[in-house]
Amino acid sequence: MKTLLDIATCVLKKIDPFLLVKEHLGHIDIGGYSNLYVVGAGKGAARMAEAVEEYFGDAIRDGCIIMPENEKTPNLASIQYTYATHPYPNKNGMEGAKKILEIANKAEKGDLIISLISGGGSALMCLPAEGVSLKEKIDTTTLLIKSGANINEINTVRKHISQIKGGFLAQALYPARCINIVISDVIGDDLSTIASGPLSPDETTFADALNVLDKYGLTDQVPQTVLRFLKEGKTETIKSGQGIFKGVDTTILANHQTVADFAKRCCDDNDVPNEILATDCSGECRDKAVEILKKVIDQGKVYIITGETTVTIKGKGMGGRNQEFVLSCLNEIDKNLKWEDFTVLAIGTDGVDGICPQKTAGAVGTKETLAKAKELGLSMEKFLENNDSYHFFEKTDGLIVTGPTGTNLGDLMLIRRK
C-alpha cells in the first residue's frame, strides 16, 4: 500500500504548472496581433512562463515575471525574471512590478498580453501606493498575517495600498487584449483575491480595509501613514462594469479541487481506498483539525482534504499552518481519540509552510511520533501554545522538506487511520 508521503509526491508531480499551462496553450491563437507580451507573478510564474516561451518562442516581443527568490534559474530567453520575497515583499518585487506596469502601459490596441498569475503574487508583485513606503507595507502585511486574518481580508487591505493590484494592471494595459491564465490558491477562486486581483474588478472599498484592521485590533498598530491613506480613500480600486475588463479573458487552470482530484487519482491508481472529505478547508487551524478528525471513521481509507487554514499567532515559536495542523491532530488523537495506528500528513503545495529556519513543506505524524515525543518528554500542548510546531517535528523527525515546488495550489492534508 502506498504511504501518504508517496501520494503527496505523486500529487506534486501532477500539478507542475509547466504541464498544466502547456496543455492549455493550444487554445490560444496569437495570429492577427501586432505584438505579444508576457507578464506574471506568483509561485508558479517561472514554470508557467517556461511553457509559454517554449510554445510561442520568438513571437514574444517582451516580458517580465516575478518569482520567489532561491528558486532555480528558469529556462527563459525572451521573458525577463525578477526574484522577490514571500510572504513579506521586498525592493526586488517592487522593481519587477514597475517593469510589468511599463510593459502594460506600452501595449496598444492590436497587441496581446499573456498574463500568468498564481498564488503568492500579492507579496511578490508589490508596488505600494504613492505616499506609502515599502517598509510600511511590509509592517502592515506582517501584522495582518500574524493576526489570523484570512487571505481575503489580508488582500482587501493590500489592494488598497497598491498601485498594481485591485484591477490597476488591467487599467494600465487597456486597450490591449489580455489572456489571463490563473492557478488559484484561494478557496472559491475569487479572482479579486488571487494575487490581489491585478486584472480583476474589486468590489471591496477603503471602508472594508479599515474594517479588517478594526476587526483584528490593528487600527492603532499599523503605520500611521497607511492608516491615514486608507482613511483619505482618494483612489479606489477598479470596480466592475468598466470597459477596461472587456478585453481580459481569464481561465483558471487549477485550484484546490484539482489537488484533491489528483490525490484521489493517485490513490485509485494504487488501489488505495479513499474519500475526498473537503476541498474548502478554512478557519482556525486547531479547530479544523479537531473537526476533521471526527469525520475520519473508516480504517484503511485515505481521507483527502484541501484548502487553506489560518493560524492566530500568539507564541514566539516557528512553524506554519500545516505543521500546526498535524501537531493539533496528534494532540487530539493522544488526548481524546486514542487511535492505535494512524498517519496524518499536511503540506503546502508550494513547499513552503510558514516561517521556519529552513524551507519546510509541512509535517507527518504517526503513532511513532507520539511515542518519540513521550520518550523525549515533549508536551504537545506547550509547543502549540508557543506556535512552535517546527521545533516539535524537528525533534521527532516529522518535518517534510521538498524545497520550493514551483507552484501554489493551497494545502494538501491526508489522514489514514489504520
Image (tube, rainbow, N blue to C red):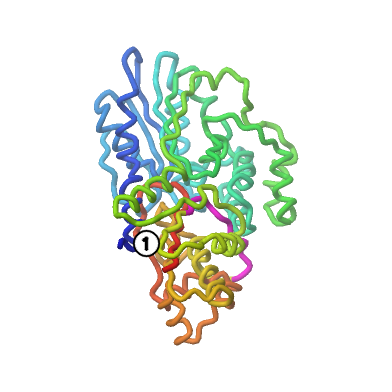
Q: Is residue 199 above or below residue 273?
A: above
How far across and how far down the image is residue 247, in percent? 49, 19
Residue at 39 percent of width and 38 percent of height: 65
Please name whichever residue, 303 or 283, is drawn nearer the observer in this view of the structure. 303
How far across and how far down the image is residue 415, in percent? 45, 62
Q: Is residue 107 above or below residue 184?
A: above
Total numbered labels: 1
Residue at 25 percent of width and 33 percent of height: 54
| Residue 96 visible to an observer of this rendering | no
Q: Is residue 4 left or right of residue 323?
A: left
Residue at 60 percent of width and 44 percent of height: 152
Q: Is residue 417 above or below residue 97?
A: below
Picture quarter with the C terminus:
bottom left
Please name whichever residue, 132 or 200, is drawn nearer the observer in this view of the structure. 200
Q: Residue 382's quadrant in the figure? A: bottom right
How far across and how far down the image is residue 170, in percent? 52, 26
Question: Considering the numbered disc 1 on the image, is that residue within a helix, a strand or a loop?
Answer: helix
Q: Main secondary structure of the magenta part?
A: loop
Q: Which residue is tagged 1?
A: 4
Per the rendered image, the range of residues in magenta is 305-315
Q: Residue 416's quadrant in the figure? A: bottom left
How far across and how far down the image is residue 283, in percent? 61, 55
Picture quarter with the N terminus:
bottom left
Please name whichever residue, 284 or 338, is drawn nearer the observer in this view of the structure. 338
| Residue 13 visible to an observer of this rendering | yes
Residue at 28 percent of width and 32 percent of height: 53
> Residue 306 colored magenta?
yes
> Residue 136 colored magenta?
no
Please name whichever residue, 361 or 167, is drawn nearer the observer in this view of the structure. 361
Instruction: Count residues near mark 1 (Cα–Cα under 10 Å), then give few for <14, some for 14-19, many for 20+.
Output: many
Q: Amino acid at mark 1?
A: Leu
